[in-house]
Image: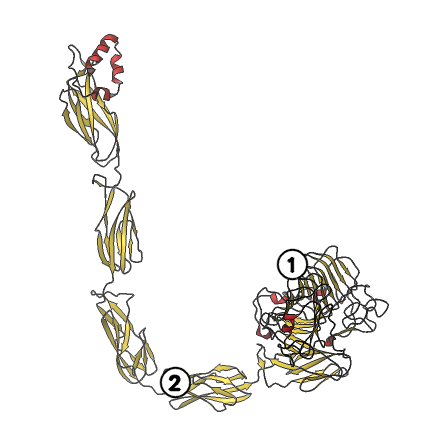
């Protein structure tokens, strides 16, 4: 390829003095590498005009090499034959010689050194002195590998060792000045500093890693403990008296005598009858003599010689020297044997005795138990010496008296047995206490010394039991005996009978062959059936006393009726059953029962049930236990449509208050969570002719939850309400067509009968000893005494001259009163549950 010939020919034709400059702008490779053909010799008469180095710019890492090429040119454009020398501003250039035709020159550059930067490589031609320069950008070579020395090491806890990192490039050249970070994979065994200094922290193994520019190397470290070489014990020769203790200290040491910490030390005594030693080195002197106590650690041991001298007991003191205890309580006495100088002696055997075990006994450890009122002397004896304490035993005072049942109905000449239970301040039952009985009105009811009540004449009397100044009472209603409830089934219904005493669940359930349990009757009823339940106590399971899941129809209710009012008792057995009465069906009426003792609800119809009637029942003592959760406890849970709640006697509902029977609930839910009737939802609910009293853990009626339409609260009597919160009726949810009429509110807390507001409601012709409240429209009689016959004995009938007589609205949904008396008896309806006659 005649490169030189063609170039000379072009120059001759162009005859332009700038042509050479243009030539020099061509890529060097065009003349250097063109087919590697020999360049023509310089033409005759030309001069050396230029020298070109290729390439002009190169980037290298430190210690990299690169081969540069240089060629000289005549002013005619032909290549020139010159000698070339190489030089550089940093590193070195080795002359690799000239090509075979003498026209190309080669120099090998090496970026030797440690300093990155921009440097020059210069090629100079002789004899002309022409030269050219290439720029070399020298950068640090990346770390390709990192090694750590030593690659493994073993040290003891607390010792150190220095690790050394070495960084190299891809050619194996050592790189200096690189940043190295250190880490340990197990800092509890070995830690490493930023300079690679490793410290043994605990026994075990760890891997130490050095990292630089993404490359890493490791060293495996094993850390072991310094072995124990000796053990010293101090003091070496302690002296103790019998019963005394002394602390020995063991110090494990290494071979250089340095103390070693954290080592396991075991202790032993050569004679434990003289000196016993604990696992911590505490020596107890037990008898006169000497014993060697040895401390051992990792096979090495040290010892101390313990000398024990015996000191006799000279006196015994007992503390306290006297104490007064109620019966049933205990107190701990402490006996201290002492030497002649009054110094306490430990480890001595002490025996205890009482001179009157009828009144107080004492255990082998000095624990005194009060048995009966009186006194006793407790004696502690050690080595023939005695000390005493005088004990006086008193009775635990009565804190409360409760009477069961809390209410009862009898007829003139009939009797009922009341029971009084005395308890202490913690709610513990006290036995053997004297109880006296009294009646508020002997013309209505009398009571014997044993609590047997006899009905005398129609009315209400309060029977009171008294013990040590504390009282409890029960309300006794005496009336003309109504005829036993007859059976009147509807439609195709039949009569079914239940008798707790004479019945059998295998019977057919007719009058002559009754069922034994009321649940058996509930399991077989059909629409129109009436179940007559005879006097007795009926119990159920943990869910309910009675669960009614078979109902009637609109024209044929299923009816459960106590044959004698409140004579059939549905008993939750002191909170064993969650509910007394559970209803999961429609068209059911339950009347005349006493319901008590459940832990959640007295009556609980399922949400969305229809046409439920709860009538004439005595519902009380529901949820009577210590409870701190937000659960609501209620006599009647009203979530049904077309529900009637009428003529019920509802009282004493809800959890214990703080301090009651030892209850400490930890919050104030006992003030407002438990109610007489809790109305959460439904349509067309009638609450009429009921008596609510002693609902002190919430409200007689609580309206809360979903919206309700058509709620009638009419002709009820409310008394002795919650002293901690406002109101006897609480309105806390949307209610449309609300009617609160003809009710008596006796002694409402904070002078509010109704709390909460419902727009568009009718709150009219109510009578209250305080304010009524509640908003709505209507006119009420406020701050007025209703003049009950005797509210202290729970006789809420109206006296002659009561402002409630003839003062009510004429309500076509209230045609009789609590006792079944027709309304009105006078010129108009009376206010409250009772019609005056």
Q: In the figure, is residue 469 to the left or right of 111?
A: right
Residue 10 position in % (x across, y down): 24, 11
Q: Nearer the viewer, mark 2 or mark 1?
A: 1
Q: Which residue is mark 2?
A: 338
Q: Quadrant of residue 450?
A: bottom right
Q: Is residue 70 above or below residue 360?
A: above
Q: Quadrant of residue 770?
A: bottom right
Q: In the figure, is residue 423 to the left or right of 694?
A: left
Residue 355 position in % (x across, y down): 48, 91
Q: Nearer the viewer, residue 608 or 738?
A: 608
CB-based contact (under 8 Å), mark 2 and mark 1: no
Query: Which comes sooner in the sequence, label 2 or label 1?
Result: 2
- What residue is rendered at 54% in x and 86% in y? 393
Residue 293 position in % (x across, y down): 26, 77
Q: Is residue 254 above or below residue 26?
A: below
How was the colour assigned to the protein in this rendering? secondary structure
> Judging from the image, what secondary structure is the residue with disc 1 in?
loop
Q: CA distance from mark 2 to mark 1?
A: 73 Å
Q: In the figure, is residue 505 to the left or right of 146?
A: right
The quadrant the N terminus occupies is: top left
Q: Residues within 10 Å of mark 1 (few under 14, many from 20)?
A: some
Q: In the figure, is residue 470 to the left or right of 394?
A: right
Q: Nearer the viewer, residue 61 or 582?
A: 582
Q: Is residue 43 above or below residue 743?
A: above
Residue 265 position in % (x across, y down): 28, 71
Q: Nearer the viewer, residue 512 or 299?
A: 512
The quadrant the C terminus occupies is: bottom right
- What residue is rendered at 20% in x and 64% in y? 256
Q: Quadrant of residue 739?
A: bottom right
Q: Which residue is mark 1?
A: 705
**Residue 76 appears in the rendering:** no
Q: Residues within 10 Å of mark 2 (few under 14, many from 20)?
A: many
């Amino acid at each position: 390829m005649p490169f030189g010939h063609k170039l000379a020919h072009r120059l001759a034709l162009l005859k332009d003095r700038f042509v050479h400059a243009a030539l020099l702008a061509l890529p060097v490779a065009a003349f250097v590498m063109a087919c590697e053909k020999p360049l023509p010799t310089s033409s005759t008469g030309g001069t050396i005009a230029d020298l070109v180095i290729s390439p002009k710019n190169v980037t290298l890492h430190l210690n990299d090499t690169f081969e540069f090429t240089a060629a000289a040119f005549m002013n005619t454009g032909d290549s020139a034959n010159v000698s070339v020398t190489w030089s550089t501003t940093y590193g070195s250039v080795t002359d690799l010689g000239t090509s075979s035709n003498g026209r190309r020159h080669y120099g090998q550059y090496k970026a030797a050194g440690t300093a990155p930067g921009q440097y020059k490589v210069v090629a100079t031609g002789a004899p002309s002195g022409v030269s050219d320069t290439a720029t070399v950008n020298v950068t640090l070579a990346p770390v390709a590998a990192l090694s750590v020395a030593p690659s493994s090491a073993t040290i003891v806890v607390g010792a150190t060792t220095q690790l050394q990192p070495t960084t190299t490039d891809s050619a194996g050249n050592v790189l200096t000045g690189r940043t190295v970070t250190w880490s340990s994979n197990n800092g509890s065994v070995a830690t490493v500093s930023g300079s690679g200094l490793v410290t043994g922290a605990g026994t075990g193994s760890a891997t130490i890693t050095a990292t630089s520019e993404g490359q890493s190397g490791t060293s495996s470290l094993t850390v072991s403990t310094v072995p124990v070489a000796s053990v010293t014990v101090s003091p070496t020769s302690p002296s103790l008296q019998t019963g005394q203790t002394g602390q020995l200290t063991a110090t494990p040491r290494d071979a250089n005598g340095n103390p070693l910490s954290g080592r396991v030390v075991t202790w032993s005594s050569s004679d434990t009858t003289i000196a016993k030693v604990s696992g911590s080195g505490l020596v107890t002197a037990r008898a006169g003599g000497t014993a060697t106590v040895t401390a051992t650690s990792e096979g090495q041991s040290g010892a101390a010689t313990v000398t024990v001298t015996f000191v006799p007991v000279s006196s015994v003191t007992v503390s306290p020297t006297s104490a007064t205890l109620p019966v049933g309580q205990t107190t701990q006495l402490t006996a201290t044997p002492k030497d002649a100088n009054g110094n306490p002696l430990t480890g001595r055997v002490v025996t205890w005795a009482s001179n009157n075990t009828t009144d107080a006994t004492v255990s082998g450890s000095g624990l005194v138990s009060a048995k009966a009122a009186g006194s006793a002397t407790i004696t502690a004896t050690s080595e023939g010496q005695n000390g005493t304490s005088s004990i006086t035993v008193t009775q635990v005072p009565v804190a409360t008296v409760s009477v069961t049942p809390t209410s009862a109905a009898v007829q003139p000449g009939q009797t009922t047995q009341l029971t009084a239970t005395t308890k202490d301040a913690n709610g513990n039952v006290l036995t053997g206490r004297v109880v006296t009985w009294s009646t508020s009105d002997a013309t209505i009811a009398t009571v014997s010394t044993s609590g047997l009540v006899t009905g005398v004449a129609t009315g209400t009397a309060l029977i009171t039991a008294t013990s040590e100044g504390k009282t409890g009472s029960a309300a006794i209603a005496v009336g003309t005996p109504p005829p036993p409830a007859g059976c009147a089934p509807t439609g195709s219904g039949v009569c079914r009978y239940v008798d707790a005493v004479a019945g059998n669940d295998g019977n057919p359930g007719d009058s002559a062959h009754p069922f034994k349990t009321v649940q058996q009757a509930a399991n077989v009823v059909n629409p129109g059936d009436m179940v007559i339940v005879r006097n007795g106590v009926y119990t159920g399971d943990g869910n309910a006393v009675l669960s009614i899941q078979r109902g009637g129809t609109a024209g044929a209710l299923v009816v459960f009726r106590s044959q004698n009012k409140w004579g059939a008792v549905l008993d939750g057995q002191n909170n064993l059953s969650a509910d007394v009465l559970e209803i999961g069906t429609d068209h059911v009426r339950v009347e005349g029962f006493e319901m008590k003792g459940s832990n959640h609800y007295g009556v609980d119809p399922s949400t969305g049930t229809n046409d439920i009637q709860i009538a004439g029942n005595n519902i009380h003592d529901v949820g009577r236990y210590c409870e701190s959760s937000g659960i609501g406890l209620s006599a009647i849970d009203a979530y049904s449509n077309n529900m009637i709640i009428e003529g019920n006697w509802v009282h004493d509902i809800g959890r214990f208050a703080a301090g009651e029977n030892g209850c400490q609930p930890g919050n104030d839910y006992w003030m407002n969570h438990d109610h007489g009737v809790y109305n959460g939802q439904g349509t067309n609910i009638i609450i009429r002719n009921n008596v609510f009293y002693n609902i002190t853990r919430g409200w007689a009626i609580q309206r809360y939850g979903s919206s309700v339409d058509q709620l009638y609260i009419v002709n009820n009597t409310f008394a002795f309400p919650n002293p901690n919160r406002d109101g006897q009726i609480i309105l806390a949810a949307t209610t449309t067509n609300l009617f609160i009429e003809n009710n008596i509110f006796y002694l409402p807390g904070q002078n509010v009968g109704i709390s909460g507001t419902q727009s568009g409601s009718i709150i009219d012709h109510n009578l209250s000893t305080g304010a009524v409240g509640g908003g709505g429209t209507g006119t009420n009689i406020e701050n007025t005494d209703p003049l009950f016959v005797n509210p202290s004995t729970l006789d809420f009938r109206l006296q002659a001259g009561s402002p409630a007589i003839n003062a009510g609205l004429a309500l076509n949904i209230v045609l009789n009163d609590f006792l079944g008396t027709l309304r009105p008896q006078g010129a108009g309806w009376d206010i409250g549950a009772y019609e005056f006659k």
